[in-house]
Amino acid sequence: MAILPIYLYGTDILKKKARAVDGVDSSIIKLMVDLAQTMRKANGIGLAATQVGDMRQMLVVDQTAIERAARDEEEEEDAPLPSEVKTLVMINPFVVDEEGTISLEEGCLSIPELRAEVNRAERIRVKFRDDNFDEKELTAEGFLGRVILHEIDHLNGILFVDRIGKTRKTFLNSELKRIKKGEVDTSYPVVTALEV
């Protein structure tokens, strides 16, 4: 088990498309565990393998954090917190259906300290392989659906800033240049464009 460095905006690997996984072996299991630990160390709610320099189609989502955020949003103070940490592992995920559109603010561990409004589907249906490599299908909406779409984008070489308008991105250029140089303060290890 290891905390892996997260590649920052400007590194070439974040613009590449990941390759499909053929099955679960010891290296895939290690990647699952390392991704989950790295995500939690960075206080993230999702993490794609490409963000840690691995070109296999895998992502993890912290379902416990998403449930907590949903509970806070609904202000159900009496609802118990989940007793265990639940991590959703998705191998070779792809969206088979989308409904509606909603614009919400997003951030990214690969683009720290920067947030922007992004349009995404309100509800999705996604197929994937789970941690046992069993085929699954999931319908997700709200925050969970948004996180899954964000991470699938990473596996396809797309960053959330690629989904905002050109005018808005122009206003973010100075911040993006700063991140590209590694001029950010993070609680987790990173790899900058200048280091690769």
Image (cartoon, helix red, strand yellow):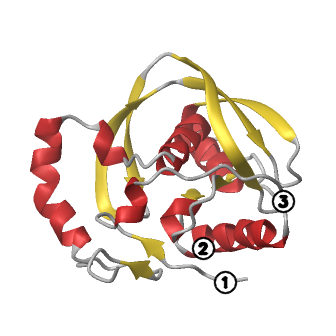
Q: Nearer the viewer, residue 33 or 67?
A: 33
- On screen, residue 84 versus residue 149, left or right, reads right
- On screen, residue 182 versus residue 52, left or right, reads left
Q: CA distance from mark 2 to mark 3?
A: 20 Å
- Tell me whether circle 2 and circle 3 mark residues in contact (CB < 8 Å): no
Q: Quadrant of the C terminus?
A: bottom left
Q: Secondary structure at mark 3?
A: loop
| First in residue order: circle 3 vs circle 1 | 1
The residue under the point 68% across, 67% down is 36
Instruction: Residue under label 1, please give it.
Output: 2
Kind of residue indicated by mark 3: Val
Q: CA distance from mark 3 to mark 1?
A: 19 Å
Instruction: Residue under label 3, please give it.
Output: 24
Kind of residue indicated by mark 1: Ala
Residue 21 position within the rendered picture, expressed as x and y whole percent measured from the top left? 72, 53
| Front tag of 3 and 1 | 3
- On screen, residue 126 versus residue 154, left or right, reads right
Instruction: Residue under label 2, please give it.
Output: 38
Residue 119 position within the rendered picture, expressed as x and y whole percent measured from the top left? 37, 30
Q: Quadrant of residue 175?
A: bottom left
- Please, is residue 123 above or below residue 11 in the view? above
